[in-house]
Amino acid sequence: MTRVLFFFLVLALAGLGVVWIVDRPGEIAVTWQGYRIETTLAVAIGFVALAAIVLASLFLLLRFLFRLPSLLARRSAKRRRAKGYAALTRGMVAVGAGDAKLARRSAAEAHRHLEPEPLTLLLAAQSAQLSGDRAGAESAFGKLAEHPSTRLLGLRGLHIEAQRRGDAEAAIHFAQEAHKIAPLPWSAKAVLDHHAAKSQWEHALAAIESNIAAKLVDKKTGERQRAVLETAVALDKATQAPEEALRLARQALRRAPDLIPAVALAARLSARKGELRKAAKLIESAWQRQPHPELAETYLDLRPGDSNADRLAKARTLAKLVPRDPESGMIVARAALAARDFKTARQAMTPLVGDDERPTARMCLIMAELEDAETGDQGQVRQWLARSARAPRDPVWMADGVGAAQWAPVSPVTGRLDAFVWQRPLDRLGTQIEAHDWSKAVEAPVAEIAPPSAPGPKLKETEAAANAAESTLEKPPARTGGPVIFPMPAPPDDPGLSEEKEDKDKVGLF
């Protein structure tokens, strides 16, 4: 609307100007080179306007003729650029769709039509990765890393390629270079995992502090990682500097109260200082959150010199806190077996191995030890041992698909921090790993603390006898402080050997 009003305003002013000139006629005379030209004012103004229009037209024509080559070149470049971006679009779509052949062809076309720029190099790198050309991908990412504006992108690609070829040193080098430019989640994780895998706990803590300051991790995750690293440092210092180790363990518990290794370590160190009541309350509080065999064993061994009856009383106290949990029943049964209180042991195990229950391998081993100690019935012992071979597995420390007898700060497979979780493994053949013996970090008050699932001495003798039947029975899982080996898949439940099978095995074994 404003433009229309402005147009009419200009038109009105022009009309007024023409009327003003017509109302005031005049003559103009020009004498030049012996010629005299006389005309009216209106004609003179019209002639000047026409001459201006002609001169402007000539100027525009000459300007167009001089700029014609550059205009043609610009138009050709524009067409090439349009073709290049079209090829770039096809290439990106082909990479996303997994069409390696079209991606390579589009990358070559984009490189031909476009000047070397980040998108063409990225497409070339991605198409090379898709087709398995590692050298081509590294070359493209290397060119990206040479330019300041695309250095982070190139370093990320080089980091990934180094990981794919298994060059850990090169991978961490590229991650550290990228982390110096800008703290990004992938580079921060790579630097942290590297320090953790190398057991460089102090550097790992510094990396976590940097990640939290840059808001790369949320507060809860950062506090959990701090707690894990502080527990790792405390385990290393437990023998040489117990006071410092205890301070770190308590600090880790303030950050992550459910961290079982920190609870057990803090309790053992507190017991060594004579703070038995504080250590006991620490374990009791953690036991109510998550009953764990390591907590139970630590609780029973807090006071040196306790008799087996005293240990049984402590086991009952602990079991009353979470009476329905299977760990409560098993810890009472183990303590009762050591105290030769077979009635209490059987009462504790009966709810766990009833007809409607599926006892785990550890429960079966406890029942085998109970039968051996109380009745001496080797048939029952061998039946429970056979059931343990096919029973559901007990929870163990799991990290990246493998199990370990003891907790560790990082995964032995990937080096990932805080990878171990307490869970039941799959019933399949697994990988055995050598876990660091963290239990030796603190000397036990009496004897060395046995692993939670370790059978008694009598049971070991019966197990040795049962191993002679390897042709018909599957070997029970290892129950020592060493690595955990998972058995082959089995039917969901095995009621034990039939009477006929048991009679045949008696002939061969005894």
Image (spheres, helix red, strand yellow):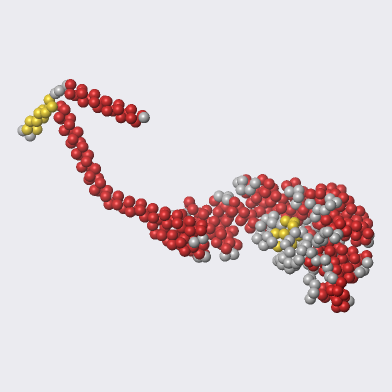
In the rendered image, the quadrant that contains the C terminus is bottom right
What residue lies at 76% left-to-right and 48% top-to-bottom?
Answer: 257
Front residue of 505/57: it is 505
Q: Is residue 69 left or right of residue 375?
A: left
Q: Is residue 88 left or right of residue 203?
A: left
- What percent of the width, then of the height, locates residue 58? 20, 42
| Residue located at (9% from left, 33% from top) | 32
Q: Position of residue 298 (x, y in %)?
A: 83, 55
Q: Quadrant of residue 47?
A: top left
Front position in the image: 470 or 132:
470
Q: Residue at x 24, y 24 (%)?
A: 16
Q: Relative to residue 190, is residue 432 depicted above or below?
A: below
Q: Residue furthest bottom?
A: 508
For the question of whether residue 306 can be seen, the reply is no
Residue 10 at x, y percent in the picture = 28, 28
In percent of the image, x 87 and y 72: which residue is there? 499
Q: Is residue 353 above or below residue 14?
A: below
Left/right placement of residue 422 relative to residue 284 reads left
Residue farthest along the top direction in this orientation: 23
Total marks shown come to 0
- Looking at this view, name the residue that lies furthest to the left: 34
From the image, which quarter does the N terminus lie in?
top left
Q: Is residue 19 above or below residue 414?
A: above
Q: Is residue 177 visible?
A: yes
